Amino acid sequence: MHDMSTAEKAYEELRKEMRETSTLASIGSLLGWDEHTYMPPGGAENRANQSSLIARMVHERATASKIGEWLATIESSDLVGDPHSDIGANVREWRRGYDRATKIPSSLIEELSRTEVLAQQAWAEARKESSFPKFSPWLKKIVALKKQEAECVGYAEHIYDALLDPYEPDERASNLRQVFEGLRKPLVDLIGRIASSGKKAPIELTERAYAVSGQDKLSRMGATAIGFNFNNGRLDTSVHPFCSEPGPGDVRITTRYDEHHFGDAFFGVLHETGHALYEQGLPREYAGQPIGTSRSLGIHESQSRMWENLVGRSRSFWQHFLPKAKEVFGETMRDITLDQWYFAINDVRPSFIRVEADEATYNLHILLRFELEQVLLTDDLSVDDLPSAWNERMQKYLGIAPPNDAQGCLQDIHWSGGSIGYFPTYTLGNLYAAQFFEAARKDLGDLDAQFARGEFSPLLQWLREKIHRHGQRYSARELVKHATGSELSAKPLLDHLNRRASELYGV
Ligand code: MG
């Protein structure tokens, strides 16, 4: 009989322990889903206790010294010789998580989470009153604590890298700066050309009275058509749409309905379905292991943005779907032509609020935040000067300045919750999406003809093969390289936006 080596035994122990920790975390995820969908308001206090208990248990298990011992034993063996093997990739990613979790002292973690709760309350008040001075002392505290966190975990080049890492592992601020630079000027130019084209999308077509029951029906048809498996998932309603993954075989998405804004629910559902398809495509046999877990926030967002924008806002998608929408909504849509509808759902115009921004202007909102986060961390910008720096950039990039801070630097929840380094993953998602889509088009031939026939499974199978099934086996950079043959580039996204603008605005 073959004797298991010490390293093999350590790996088995580690895998079992991590599997249980991941099951525990999935209970927390289910509690979170319920909190945002069906929990009565009176349950809030007990739910907070339940959630923080689970979070503490997960953290204690993840930072236990035996994890470090097992990792060290395995790492000193030849089990990890191939970094892309099951064991090699799992151990690399477990090490990443363990180091980060243990390098930050628990006193700092506690101070951060206490500060974040209070800062979020202060932010909500400040936004309501559009009063930046009410939030600025808290933001100063958050920035100081996040700098401490970055120093504890360490970084190779820039302090920003340490805060980017938990969201987009191995990515560097220097690389993002370079790629985003290539995006900025062409985008500002494109948006300027669109504005001076004199053409306006007929958005009023999407603002007619679309009954909520019809929106729900059509959204479910859309999700099903692109591959969402309702046997392994649900669609419910919440204030802020999200996708949550209570575990293998159970992926839940939410949306919200606005009778006079068709796009909120329909494109929101396509977006969340994109996230869900990624989760439903992860290899189930590796559940609870990094190689069975999504790669990064940027890669996740690429899946949602692809189905929402590159597929869902394409002309060919609506060749197939407009007749169905007309059946559902009857009189409300009877007079709408495909060309009018295609233009209406691809309106491009500068606006103040990121989450309401169109596909072209959206990235400038992100570039602005990415730039400001970096100078806040290096003390090249003081928190007190943030509103004016924000407004200046809005004017420069989008040609508009917000009338108040509620519609300016107070609009997002992220910073109050300590999420500095998160924003770039949105634009990374758009960049990855366009680059993947271009490669898929090369491999699969005429995607538009397929969409027009209601065939979306070739694209989904391509994504399963190139991205979903790998989990965290490869870095995001390697995934992009393998799937598309090139490094991350701004060109596919710019090409896509320019093509659409030329079709619709003639610029
Ligand atoms: Mg998303």
Image: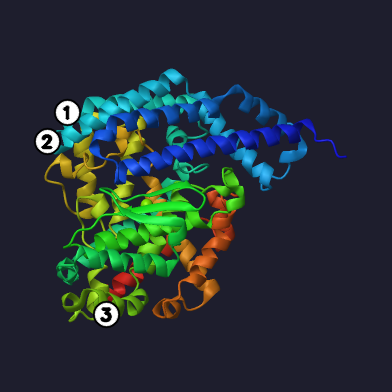
Q: Amino acid at mark 2?
A: Glu
> Mark 1–mark 2 contact, CB under 8 Å?
yes
Earlier along the polypeptide chain: callout 3 or callout 2? 2
Q: Rounded to the nearest whole Å, what is the CA distance between mark 3 and mark 2?
A: 43 Å
Q: In front here: 388 or 402? A: 402
Q: Does label 3 or label 1 sit earlier along the sequence?
A: 1
Q: Is residue 62 visible?
A: yes
Whether residues under marks 3 and 1 lie with C-beta atoms below 8 angstroms apart, the answer is no
Looking at numbered disc 3 in the image, what kind of residue is underneath it? Leu
Give the mark nearer the N terminus: 1 vs 2. Answer: 2
Residue of label 3:
338
> Label 1 sits on what residue type?
Lys
- Which residue is denoted by mark 1 in the rendering? 134
Please, what secondary structure does the residue beneath circle 2 have? Answer: helix
| Image point (74%, 33%), residue name | 9
Q: Residue furthest top?
A: 107
18 vs 489, nearest the viewer:
18
27 vs 324: above or below: above
Q: Secondary structure at mark 3?
A: helix
In the image: residue 73, left or right of residue 379? right
Picture coordinates of residue 115, whole percent (x, y): 31, 24
User: Which residue is labeled 2 in the image?
Assistant: 129
